[in-house]
Amino acid sequence: MVKPPNNKRFTNEQYDRLKAEAAAPYRGLRKFIYIAFGASGFVGALVFLAQIAAGKEADAPLSNLALQVGVVALMVFLFRWDKESPKIPK
């Protein structure tokens, strides 16, 4: 592990956090966006599933349900892909 310079501007913990942020900028923000969009897609899927169960016009809710399920699947994929991205060696 690389140690911070001798001037002690940062503690070892702060230096490690800065290195992690430099390796994967905005990772926390990206994960929040994946979770928010995934939750939105899930709620939308529930709404369209309820419309299908209620017997409304079958064409529009079915295609919208497919779109919402696709959004949820994409967000799960992106969340896992971002989680598996390289990390800083210790």
Image: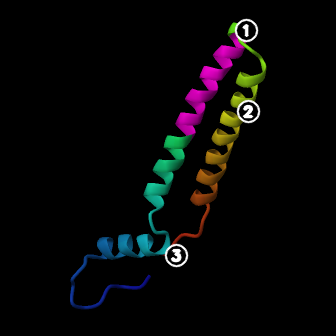
| Left or right: 6, with 39 as reference point | left
Q: Quadrant of residue 42 in the image?
A: top right
- Taking 5 as reference, is 76 left or right? right
Q: Is residue 39 in the magenta section?
A: yes
Residues at marks 3 and 2, CA–CA distance in whole angstroms: 41 Å
Q: Position of residue 27 (x, y in %)?
A: 47, 61
The one nearer the camera, 32 or 84, is 32
Answer whether residue 75 is magenta in the image: no
Prevalent SS, magenta region: helix
Q: Which residue is mark 3?
A: 89
- Measuring 57% from the left and 40% from the top, which residue is drawn there? 38
Q: Look at label 3 and name its amino acid.
A: Pro
Q: Which residue is label 2 attached to?
A: 66
Dot 3 alpha-carbon crowd within 10 angstroms: few under 14, some 14 to 19, many 20 or more: few
1 or 2: tag closer to the N-terminus: 1
Q: Do labels 3 and 2 touch, CB within 8 Å?
A: no
- Few, some or many C-alpha atoms within 10 Å of disc 2 (few <14, some 14-19, many ≥20)? some
Callout 1 amino acid: Gly
